[in-house]
């Protein structure tokens, strides 16, 4: 090896190891960042926590400017949300454009906003004004993005609760509620037109809580079990979440669409619940979320869509003490507000207040030193022979 070749190799070392480091650290799952708490850490501290967790996507229920600013240049993808009460106003194209100009344009050059969720679980409120405003508001928001030149960067959708599904077992029988089809059919047509995903909040916990004597705990926790086989498709399911996802695909297909991707905008398991909330324990929450993350890491698809890795946003980042009853609602967090994990699912994150800047910098420096030293030693051995 010539001297020039030796120094060229030295120049490549930062690229080589930095690329390797990024590949090792990246973890393609999302997390819901709720803010219904009076003791939550600052957005800048949360940005540091998310970076240490290697989370690639965040879903907000609003468009908090402090959060969007705190994540500038982070590379984290954001779904931001509109409030349900704003839907009637957002039907108006001028109001939709003002919303985009206020909540998206000031941040998108540095914060990776990729999607706007127009409303959240709107059909659960049984409010005719909200129900009839949902699609027009989605359309106005999309048209505003188009007119502002942002439609290639940001898409539009809405998150629905699993209550929109009337039938889910077996998965091939999946169907939407009859009373909602008049609203969901044009919404699905809109999704297909703009190529945006259908978001659904799916919680096997609620199914188990409602029927613990008939539903296997191992089945809902991704633990070894005999599972179930769909008699129509002959597909085998070893967990409830994947069955729920395929039931949604079946419901969408019944309305004429096979061109819409389903994404899980919320799923999780509470670490604590009230006396009637069977299964809400730290142990079960740890098992559910750790097994789910393993499936995500393996890029698993559902039995009906094996080539499409499940796309999931875990609920939630923190326990939120201002959420209303039941008790479980305040205990879905992976972390306490002080940055301590509620249980261990293999994600080693930290708030800067807890560990200090020196620790994180020294850790990176030590890794870099080991990498560089190993490379130099290897090169020296080559030069000797």
Image (tube, rainbow, N blue to C red):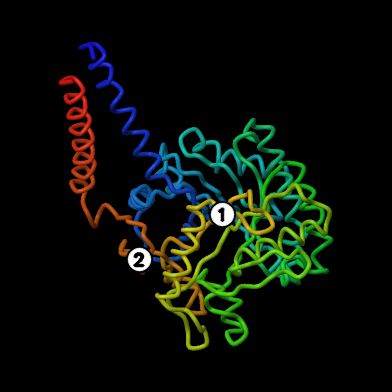
Placement of the N terminus among the 4 image quadrants: top left
Q: Nearer the viewer, residue 233 or 244?
A: 233
Q: Tell me if residue 273 comes above or below residue 36 in the rendering.
A: below
Check disc 1 and report the residue beneath it.
300
Residue visible at 49% across and 81% down in the picture: 279
* SS of the residue under disc 2: loop
Residue visible at 18% across and 19% down in the picture: 383
Residue 101: % across, % down: 58, 38
Badge 1: residue crowd in 10 Å (few <14, some 14–19, many ≥20): some
Mark toward the viewer: 2 or 1: 1
Q: Which mark is residue 56?
A: none
Q: Tell me if residue 97 comes above or below residue 14 in the rendering.
A: below
Q: Nearer the viewer, residue 221 or 205?
A: 221
Placement of the C terminus among the 4 image quadrants: top left
Q: Earlier in the sequence, mark 2 or mark 1?
A: 1
- Residue 304: name its quadrant: bottom right
* SS of the residue under disc 1: loop
Residue 106: % across, % down: 51, 36
Residue 308: % across, % down: 63, 49
Q: Which mark is residue 344?
A: 2
Question: Is residue 176 in sight in this rendering?
Answer: no
Residue visible at 58% across and 69% down in the picture: 203
Residue extending farthest to the front is 385
């Amino acid at each position: 090896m010539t001297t020039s070749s030796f120094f060229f190799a030295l120049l490549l070392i930062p690229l080589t190891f930095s690329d390797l480091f990024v590949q090792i650290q990246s973890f393609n799952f999302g997390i819901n960042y709720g803010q219904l708490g009076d003791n939550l850490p600052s957005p800048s501290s949360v940005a540091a926590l998310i970076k240490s967790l290697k989370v690639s996507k965040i879903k907000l229920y609003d468009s908090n400017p402090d959060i969007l600013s705190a994540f500038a240049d982070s590379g984290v993808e954001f779904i931001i949300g509109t409030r349900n009460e704003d839907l009637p106003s957002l039907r108006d194209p001028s109001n939709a454009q003002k919303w985009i100009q206020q909540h998206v344009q000031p941040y998108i050059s540095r914060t990776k906003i990729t999607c706007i969720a127009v409303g959240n679980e709107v059909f659960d409120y049984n409010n005719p004004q909200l129900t009839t405003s949902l699609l027009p508001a989605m359309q106005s928001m999309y048209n505003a993005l188009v007119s502002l030149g942002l439609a290639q960067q940001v898409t539009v959708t809405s998150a629905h609760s699993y209550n929109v599904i009337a039938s889910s077992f077996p998965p091939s029988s999946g169907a939407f509620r009859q009373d909602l089809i008049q609203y969901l059919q044009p919404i699905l047509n809109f999704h297909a037109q703009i190529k945006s995903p259908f978001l659904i909040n799916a919680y096997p916990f609620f199914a188990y809580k409602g029927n613990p004597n008939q539903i296997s705990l191992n089945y809902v926790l991704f633990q070894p079990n005999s599972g179930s086989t769909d008699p129509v498709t002959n597909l085998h399911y070893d967990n409830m979440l994947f069955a729920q996802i395929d039931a949604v695909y079946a419901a969408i297909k019944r309305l004429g669409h096979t061109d819409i991707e389903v994404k899980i905008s919320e799923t999780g398991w509470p670490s604590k619940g009230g006396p009637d909330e069977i299964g809400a324990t730290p142990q079960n929450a740890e098992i559910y979320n750790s097994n789910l993350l393993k499936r995500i890491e393996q890029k698993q698809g559902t039995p009906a869509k094996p080539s499409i890795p499940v796309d999931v946003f875990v609920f939630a980042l923190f326990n939120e003490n201002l959420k209303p009853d039941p008790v479980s609602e305040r205990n879905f967090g992976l972390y306490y507000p002080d940055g301590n994990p509620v249980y261990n699912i293999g994600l080693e994150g930290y708030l800067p207040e807890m560990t200090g800047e020196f620790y994180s910098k020294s850790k990176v420096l030590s890794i870099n030193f080991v990498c560089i030293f190993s490379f130099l030693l290897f090169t020296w051995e080559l030069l000797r022979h």
